[in-house]
Image (cartoon, coloured by chain):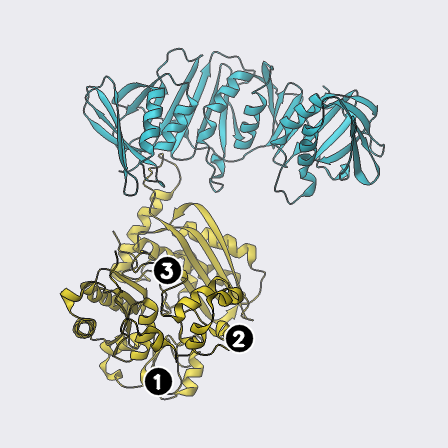
Chain colours: A yellow, B cyan
Amino acid sequence: MPAAHRTIFHVDMDAFFVSVEEVFDPSLKGKPVVVGGRPNERGVVSAASYAARKFGVHSAMPLRTAAKLCPQAIFVDGHPDRYREYSAKVYEVLNHFSPKLEMVSIDEAYVDMTGTERLLGPPMGAAHALHVAMKTATQLNCSIGIGTSRLVAKICSDQAKPNGVLWIMPGREAEFLAPLDVRKIPGVGKVMEKRLQDQGIHKVSDLASRDPGWLEQNFGALGIALSGKAHGLDAGAWFDGDIGEADGPRSISHEHTFSRDTADAQQLESTLARLSEMVCRRLREQKLHARTLQLKLRDSGFHTITRAHTLNEPTAIDSVVFATIRALFRANWKGEAIRLLGVHAAHFEDESEQIGLVGQGPHDKWNQALSAADRLREKYGENAVSLATGMKARFRERTHENPAGLPGKKKPS
Amino acid sequence: MAAEATGAIQGTAMEISVSKFELLRELTATQGVVERKTTIPILSNFLFEAGNDRLTITATDLDLSLRTSCAAKVKREGACTIPARKLYDYVRLLPDGEISIKLLENHWVNLRCGRSNTKMVGMARANFPGLPTFPSAGVVKIPAQTLRSMIGRTIFAISSEESRYTLNGGLMVLKPESITMVATDGHRLAHIEKQGEQFEVSGENKTLVPKKAMSEIYSLLQNSEVDAIEFAKDDSTLFFRIGERLLTSRQLTGQFPNYEAVLPRETTKSVVVHGADLNTSIQRVAQFADERSRAIRMKLDKNELKISSSSTDAGESEDSIETAYTADPMTIGFNSEYLLDFLKASNGGEVRLEFKDAQSAGQMRPDDANDDGFKYRYVVMPMRI
């Protein structure tokens, strides 16, 4: 039986990318810092320091816009390797507090602390201990939201920023949520907010006072979930699951935005080769094999299509993924200039334990070659070895909070 | 042959009458070839051609086509096309007796039987794809039941993975005194050979037969009294004539793997068990195998064969079969489905299992000196356990 109520921590690292950069270059501390690239480059802001945010800079904003808003900002390239390394450290710290733990992106996690009171003390004490442990192990600050549901914990951590703790005591959830804008509820985006406002629902209290039946009628299954959320309950989509239940990433993807839109078939295919290679590298790192592969194409007019193909046997082999993605590309690209390409792998299975008949296909040889290539990359860096097709498409890995392949989502066996 | 003697005269309004029993028999035989999910509407239709007191019925999915015929009273020669599935469903429901079929204007077709009267929407005969014609030379006769038996014991091992194109069919090897059929999906291989037959081939005649063609031949031979089928091929097409019926199939091109290299030669451990016992044991134990991998273990131990499985979800299970065995114990893992496929296809008698070690191919074969002259072997690669 579960305890009378659960104690959930939502731990959100403060300005994670920027803070990690500050660890490596302490001179950045306190200054407006923008992570993502040079101010004159295409591409978007991955993260901004609090000082930069004061000027209106936020993540996902084009770098050039950020440069206009805050010309004095220090622009630094992202270092995905560093962020992954620190994300792993964060996971280690949290794992000491509770094994029921789920990283939901590179810099935030839910920790189910239910039943840890005798070991770690009451929630506020445990949160303080967590702050100290995090600072000691990683030199990073985090904000902690504590509630009886993930939903409440998540909203709390947002309110606690930076470097704070907010605990909503059991029974006080509705009271806490009532005055907040509906937009604060996870799952309510721009579109949903507008639809709710059209019905006169602005605050969470407006939502909570509506009849669930009415909400269902107007918003379907989403409406029921909203009704639950307005009362501080975990409801709908992955909120229905338990923390740490969904182990392992559900997808792995890599995307590339060209610095200049291109209709050069060779460059496009070359980029797809490189992206396929990067996806496979992650797959092998996680000891995963993907069944479904998806191509993403975005043209100059921001028109985006995705096309997927499901394989009969799961794979983590570069050449198989690239061949599939290239076939999708050739079938769907009409010659228009392309802004962004993406390769996405999903439906993971473990490697087949079935041994093949001798001489049946090149898979074993590929596996051997790729594991050798992976070892070289670990030793000499990611660009040490690559498919010849992809060599024309060398580019720096962009930084984004891709929730795949995070520690705590899947423990490599 | 009536099958080819259908010089359908276009433009005339075909009119015939045919017995429901005979028509339904032929429609049933042809159903398997009609493409159900086609984007080309004409492929959902039968082609009916009437002439010389026969009705010839043709179905095709462009890869495979079947032409068959039955006796009919032909009042006016001609041709029409009729939606295949609809016609079959309708004819099945008609009472026994004569059905009169008449082509109307705009490709509509009128069917009358007793007090039933129906008009079906057909399509222009000219839209129906042309079919290859049976070659006049190089025809080989193959005993019908021999071929059916060989298909039945190999077809299950054919790969259904479309990317492994050359594994999407079985390899038929004809020599002057033997016929061999081989199929594999890269994990297991079924191989059957029959010596002592006479075939009009010079040297070695190798043909890759697509799975769907094999499956059609198998079912066409099921209720057939035909002794031998006539086989021929040209550059792109395979032809199988089974009595009045002619099956044509597009050839699979490409190199079938060198299967002889994977036939095990150095098996050092072997046991003989009763096939039916092994089948039920594996079925029981497989209930507790991992649902995705279907893996079971086989352990050869002193005078017994132990079969076991375990899964974190379902539990674990073990069966033991008594058998004479005195060599070193060994354990080997297999996909239970692969073993069951073989046991279902073999006749249920004694089966010999042969192994080398846990990483090498295992072999299964009927332990029967006189298996109607067949030499049947099944090679399965193990699973890492």
Please name which of the two marks, 2 or 1, marks the residue nearer to the observer: 2
First in sequence, mark 1 or 3: give its number: 1
Which of the 4 quarters of the picture holds residue B48?
Answer: top right
The N terminus of chain A lies in which quarter of the figure?
A: bottom left
Chain letter, disc 3 residue: A
Crowd class of label 1 (few under 14; some 14 to 19; many from 20; radius 10 Å) = many
Amino acid type, label 1: Ala
Q: Which residue is mark 3?
A: A240
> Is residue A41 in view?
no
Q: Which residue is mark 2?
A: A199
Mark identifier at residue A52: 1
Chain letter, disc 1 residue: A
First in sequence, mark 3 or 2: give its number: 2
In this rendering, position of residue A94 left or right of residue A186:
left
Q: Position of residue B310 (x, y in %)?
A: 27, 37
Q: Position of residue B280 (x, y in %)?
A: 35, 25
Crowd class of label 3 (few under 14; some 14 to 19; many from 20; radius 10 Å) = few
Judge by depth and name the residue closer to the eye, A345 or A25: A345
User: Looking at the picture, does residue A364 appear above or below residue B364?
Assistant: below
Please name which of the two marks, 1 or 3, marks the residue nearer to the observer: 3
